[in-house]
Image: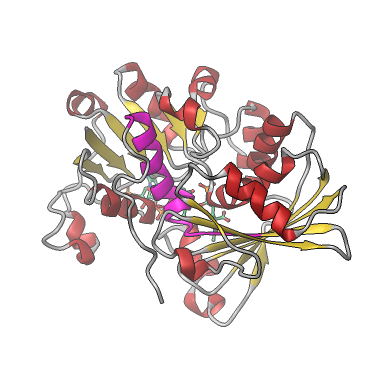
Amino acid sequence: MKIAIIGGTGYGAVELVRFLNNHPYAELKAIVSHSQSGVELSDVYPHTTDLINIKMEELDIDALSEVIDLVFFATPSNISKGIIPSFIEKGVKCIDLSGDFRLKSPDAYQKWYQSSPADQNYIDKAVYGLSEIYEEQVKGASLIANPGCFPTATLLALIPVMEQGFTDNNSIIIDAKTGVSGAGRSLSLNVHYSETNDNLKAYKLGEHKHIPEIEQTLQEQSGEDIQVTFSTHLVPMTRGIMSTIYIDLTETKSTADIIDIYKEYYKNHPFVRIRPEGTLPTTKEVYGSNYCDIGFHSDQRTGKLIIISVIDNLVKGASGQAIQNMNLLYGWDVTTGLNYLPIYP
Ligand SMILES: NC(=O)C1=CN([C@@H]2O[C@H](COP(=O)(O)OP(=O)(O)OC[C@H]3O[C@@H](n4cnc5c(N)ncnc54)[C@H](OP(=O)(O)O)[C@@H]3O)[C@@H](O)[C@H]2O)C=CC1
Ligand SMILES: CC(=O)N[C@@H](CCC(=O)OP(=O)(O)O)C(=O)O
């Protein structure tokens, strides 16, 4: 299978390169860069020296479409929506790491992304690539909208319990934290070392574009009109997301009851690991890997279930899940190319 990556010098792209390099059925044919075409990837990322010998190139849709089967877009939002239709028309499948095709409502996209939405025909075609939940739909897709990092950690943690009929689905509070690589490679004051080191910041309260993404999927899964309270925090670490979720239970359930439900739900999904009672996952325990680890505490005193979900934002939250979706798309084992033990410590 011949692959191209667009957005070559970004963190998402170089993480895709890492996984494709280890993938037995995928061949990386081209890396497109709008800022550094003609430059060797290893000149931008010296850690790939002698391992990846690819000169980045300008985007040429016609020429690329002749030689590739699949394109990964690792570009900021507002880019892929103008390019993907041309690839799809030429029979090239697309996996988009940006948010351009995630929201089914064009009005919601306009509101939360403050920009005009993609062509409705392509929004309709796009499959939301939350791999474990939409496995069957992903298998038949031509365009996959890879989920955002916070929605991945949050939705995998919430959906199984919400299907049980003993939760108050309008009581959800999501308190999420992310490492700085979530903001990508470009520089800004927000992610400046002396602004983030030794510091903890809340940001984008009430206006984060992952709010409509989370609500859209929870509404689709439950059939209810759900609103969530969602807060994001920047933590002085490179990688990792922890989503701490609070949801009211309408029946008394022990932590062990909840764990049984999740173990059953994810029994055929190797990338979701359910922690035993008394242990809660940490971001370091999934570092560099495609795992989403989930732990629970059912608080009998308050009737709230507390769920802790961790991922590596660049792996399960972006490029790893994109590779998982590629594996589903082509009928390969989902773990192909992704069989990494987390890096610890
Ligand atoms: N970082 C993360 O944890 C996650 C990221 N994502 C999403 O994945 C996508 C990539 O993120 P990430 O790699 O972190 O971001 P980066 O900022 O690190 O990289 C994005 C790359 O896109 C290219 N690019 C930037 N501006 C333009 C432009 N105007 N036109 C064309 N290409 C452009 C640049 O590469 P070049 O100049 O080489 O073309 C840039 O390096 C984003 O949509 C992001 O929201 C999703 C989940 C998690
Ligand atoms: C630290 C930081 O800024 N994180 C980003 C993560 C968003 C992201 O990367 O996801 P999208 O693909 O939806 O843009 C944020 O909170 O906006």
Would you say residue 309 sits in the magenta stretch?
yes
Q: Nearer the viewer, residue 88 or 288?
A: 288
Magenta stretch: includes residue 315 = yes
Which quadrant of the rendered structure holds the N terminus?
A: top left
Residue displayed at 58% across by 61% down: 275
Which percent across, then down, holds residue 345? 41, 77
Q: What colour-coding does the image apply?
A: secondary structure
Specify start and end residues of the magenta stretch as a single range: 308-331
Residue at position x 52%, y 42% from top?
Answer: 147
**SS assignment for the magenta stretch, majority:** helix
Q: Quadrant of residue 159?
A: top right
Looking at the image, residue 329 lies above or below residue 267:
above
Task: Work out whether residue 20 or residue 338 is closer to the camera in this orientation and state it.
Answer: 338
Regarding residue 9, the answer to whether it shows in the image is: no
Image location (x, y in percent) of residue 251: 87, 48
Q: Nearer the viewer, residue 31 or 307?
A: 307
